[in-house]
Image: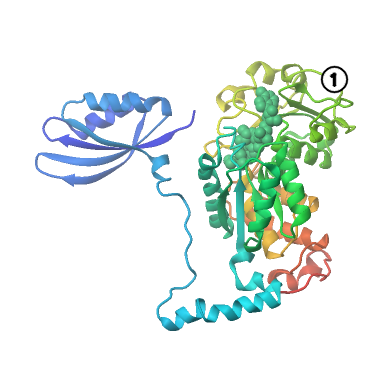
Amino acid sequence: MGFESLMIRLELSHGKASFGDVASTVSRCGGDVVAVDVIRSGSSNSVRDITVQMGPDGYERTIEALKLLDGINVINVSDRTFLAHLGGKVSIRPTMQIKNRDDLSRVYTPGVARVCMAIAADPKKVYNLTIKRNTVAVVTDGTAVLGLGDIGPGAAAPVMEGKAMLFKQLADVDAFPICLDTKDTEEIIRIVKAISPIFGGINLEDISSPRCFEIERRLQEELDIPIFHDDQHGTAIVVVAGLINALKVIGKRMEELRVVVNGIGAAGVSICKMLLAAGVKRLVPIDQCGVIVRGGAYDHPMWQWLADQAQVESQPGNLSSAIEGADVFIGVSRAGVLSVADVRKMADHPIVFAMANPEPEISPEEALPFVRIFATGRSDYPNQINNLLVFPGIFRGALDCRASSINETMKLAAAKAIAEVVSEPELNEQYIIPSIFNEQVVVKVREAVIRAAITTGIAKRIPPDFRDTTEEKGGISHTAGHA
Ligand SMILES: NC(=O)c1ccc[n+]([C@@H]2O[C@H](COP(=O)([O-])OP(=O)(O)OC[C@H]3O[C@@H](n4cnc5c(N)ncnc54)[C@H](O)[C@@H]3O)[C@@H](O)[C@H]2O)c1
Ligand SMILES: O=C(O)C[C@H](O)C(=O)O
Ligand SMILES: [Mg+2]
């Protein structure tokens, strides 16, 4: 599933082989040549880089077929995805160049000492005189990386670097990947607290459940910067945004839905909580042990919380029995657990958000003939429901107003803001959620988050663009200080 790019460096012996032979061989193996670069051209031979797009299954076949061509020498094969990772994906750049001793004495000893002492005298100044106000730590222990599981902190780094890139490109937030070689809850809390002075916020990422709940709660209690477990809240916010719009398309209301959530880990717990807050009255949470039922007894504190909720159904069962008559399936579990037979048992106008990464609970090819609305977490299909629509804008807003946390009001405001980026005339089955490249996403999420932070009294600063207009924009009073 999904197309990938491969870059192949070839030497063609003129007179023996032509570029047409190469292109037709690639095409026969199921791929397309999408770019050609001539690296060297001589009288008897030439060297070219060809970029080939195809499903991952076709790679080896293509290379073997090219090697068999007379007059073609395959010099090198590079997977473009790996090439994009060479040397990592982010770097740190200074904000000015040190050109002479005068500059040096300002940014370094002795000038810097005066600035240090100013912060020592007034710790709030760290926000204006260091990178803190714009910097977020993306912290993982590598235990729940995408749906790949506990692959360790080093292997988790490419995902964390990817999040850091997106923070910067989409919201101009400087984010730094921190991959911790410990799974111990107390140690993680201690380390994050210890590194927190230079960060304006902490984005926890891919830390497995249930430790993630305790880590987030304790850090938020003990620190006055926002702590946001992306897999919980970023995911829940984007799911609610997608659902708000999907319901507009199919004409159902939140209150009349029966919703199955499969995978009650970090993402699943938070999605369930937010669905209840959004008005869902019939909820069926399912994990590997089967349906989590109202009135049940569970060791997992969050499952017990769910079992105590009036909206959670009491009928035991498994995914295959529980999906019967469901209006919505939300998967945050693992690849391939939803079958076509399951989907066919759903109510009219089924909505399926199959969000396990990188492979969803059911492939679009299998599901699409039987569902009204389908979404995945992936970038290569329509309706990408991924927390990447949330974390850049939510942190942009939280940093700009120096919110001490990210509360429920801010989260709901973010969900509504994302949903509203797609206007009603634009909405359709293939377009329930805006593209991440829609610049309005970060702008609207930021604005909604700041307004919610100010109204709920947790903003420590009013951003300049909110200073004169807050009254007209919604009757918000100036309670926070300007800094
Ligand atoms: N699209 C997105 O934005 C997005 C965001 C967060 C997580 N995810 C994906 O959701 C999945 C879970 O992520 P998480 O952070 O919650 O991980 P997690 O490890 O905290 O939770 C996963 C849960 O799924 C359960 N599970 C595993 N197999 C199952 C099965 N066959 N049936 C029912 N439950 C099953 C596990 O027991 C666990 O409780 C991953 O694939 C991740 O990539 C997607
Ligand atoms: O990283 C992603 O693509 C989304 C999410 O954070 C996940 O863990 O799957
Ligand atoms: Mg994640």
Q: Position of residue 431 (x, y in %)?
A: 62, 40
Residue 317 makes an appearance in the image: yes
Camera-nearest residue between 310 and 113:
113
- Residue sitting farthest toward the bottom: 102
Q: Position of residue 79 (x, y in %)?
A: 38, 37
Q: Amino acid at mark 1?
A: Gln
Q: Is residue 146 left or right of residue 482?
A: left
Q: Is residue 456 left or right of residue 55?
A: right
Crowd rating for badge 1 (residues with CA inside 10 Å; few <14, some 14–19, many 20+)? few
Q: For numbered disc 1, what is the local secondary structure?
A: loop
Residue shown at 66%/29% (left/top)? Answer: 333
Q: Position of residue 70 (x, y in %)?
A: 17, 26
Q: Which residue is mark 1?
A: 315
Query: Is 80 situated above or below 331?
Result: below
Classify the position of ligand 1 by quadrant: top left, top right, bottom left or bottom right.
top right
Query: Is 101 situated above or below 311?
Result: below
Q: Quadrant of residue 309?
A: top right
Q: Position of residue 271 (x, y in %)?
A: 74, 38
Q: Is residue 236 left or right of residue 311?
A: left
Camera-nearest residue between 305 and 473:
305
| Quarter of the rendering occupied by the C terminus | bottom right
Residue shown at 32%/26% (left/top)? Answer: 62
